[in-house]
Amino acid sequence: MKIEHNKNFTVGAVITCFMLAVILVGMFWTPYDPNAMDGAAKRLAPCLAHPLGTDNFGRDILSRVIEGAGATFLIAAATVAIGLAAGLVIGGLTGWYGGWLDECLMRLNDAVAAFPSILLALVLIALMEPGRSSVILALGVLFVPSFARIVRAEVARQKSLDYVASARLMGAGDVRILLLHILPNIVPVLLPSVAIGFNNAVLAEASMSYLGVGVQPPDASLGRMLNEAQGYLMSAPWYALSAGAAIILLILGFGLLSEGLGGDAGA
Amino acid sequence: MLEIKDLHVRFLSTGKEAVRGVDLAIGPGQRMGLVGESGSGKTVTAMALSGLIERWNVDMSGQVLFEGRDLLTCSREQLRRVQGKDIGVVFQEPMTSLNPLMKVGRQVEEVLKIHTQASPAERRRLALEAMAQVGLPEPEVTYEKYPHQLSGGQRQRAVIASAMVIHPKLLICDEPTTALDVTVQAQILELLRSVSRDYGVAILLISHDLRVVRKLCESVAVMYKGRIVEHGDTEEVFAHPQDEYTRRLIAAIPKRTRHE
């Protein structure tokens, strides 16, 4: 069992590090300008000059995948950050204080969670306007309930343990107990859900951009590229394959990481 | 110093009255035992007077006077100033009463952080001193350890050190030795006794075990079904139990140890 978990963790870490390295490099350098069009090189199959080929505007797909992976990654990370931050506050308050505050906030939480997520995100984005920051905000809101629920359950569990009672009996204030004592103790439980949440966020960003409400052209994002690629599935399959493969690698890496983490936390 | 007058505690959720009119008084440096079977209300009494019961979960009446201030009616802020500083608590389970992710030394000095203005160096010095006093080996090394690296007895010593580092006036010990094996039990009881003697700390020992109470306490109160049925000098109670329930409790002590 142990070896298997560690294998997951190792493979996941390798894939994730590879993707992160590619994204990091892509922030400063890509083989071509991702948005530079070349009328003479439309829909080129992969070749030496363009390892992943070119799209229908003659843009280098490798450069666009690198740039798009970066965009997708940043949106997913920001989404998880919003969800996690709000989830920690809501979960912390409800788990610690309980009572009517718990009832109110958790029912609100249920209401958000009960909505079909894509629909809710579309509505939220329509209220703002399509674009990067709207997607982050809308997806962030969607991600709050799951984090809030996990944090709440954990805080409530920790609250009943003696060391928390001890801290209270030392006269420690609520904030001190929550931040100094409980928070570090729920991190092991949170880590796998952060990794899983990140995966969901990558998929959600891809769906949003695929539907055309996320990253706007000419900027690249993996979902955006899939959208553009579907018209050329037959004539330029490398376009869709490259973007799809990048999504798979991002998710696979984090998925395996979370599996490894979860296994260790449970062991 | 601590005076409990006609304390009643009723749980709102179940409507059960766990404590029905308890009167107790503990003077400075006194060691008192509170014994009774599970469900007799002894732990609830202790919780009520340490302020651990959420006030909105229970219906409490009576008075818990600590140096003249009623802990049941004072504000949370006032209560917090007493908690830890004047009243320390030691729980039954040393496995869970320490934060697993915090170094032992930091936990020992935490109460100083909350209640005093002592500098980090001063806190560390006091913590090391307290850890040495409770007999933790190599305080400097133990300071940097995490709870899981200590044995059960050592953890309970660390818990006692964290309660004692600020020299409270009263130490409430809720079954402090129940989770420990017998030899360690005796050591911890001896430690509590010396702590009480050296610093004049009063101890309220809550236990179901009359033998433990007899080893440590000068006086004993026997609780049964939320009431105190007998109260007096420990040896006197052992020699001439007045109440039927006390007699049954004493009779329940295994014979070979009854006259140890």
Image (cartoon, rainbow, N blue to C red):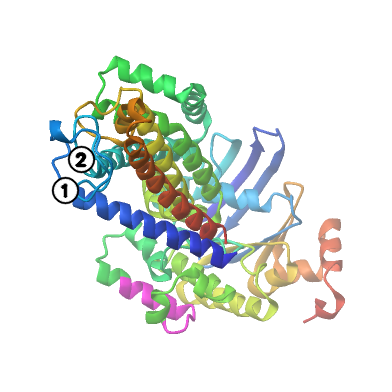
Q: Kindly identify which residue carries mark 2.
A: A60
Decide whether residue A184 is among the magenta residues.
no
Q: Secondary structure at mark 1?
A: loop
Range drawn in magenta: B124-138
- Subunit under mark 1: A
Q: Is residue B46 visible?
A: yes
Answer with left or right where residue A215 lies relative to residue B196: left
Tell me where residue B16 appears, x and y as whole percent.
72, 37
- Subunit under mark 2: A
Q: Nearer the viewer, residue A18 or B75?
A: A18
Q: Nearer the viewer, residue B155 or B166?
A: B155
Chief SS of the magenta region: helix
Q: Residue at x 23, y 39 (%)?
A: A64
Label at residue A31:
1
Amino acid tagged 2? Asp
Q: Secondary structure at mark 2?
A: loop
Q: Is residue B79 visible?
A: no
Decide whether residue B134 is among the magenta residues.
yes
Seen in the picture, residue B130 relative to B21 is either above or below; the reply is below
Distance, label 2 to label 1, CA atoms, is 8 Å
Amino acid tagged 1? Pro
What is the count of numbered marks?
A: 2
The quarter in which the C terminus of chain A is drawn is: bottom right
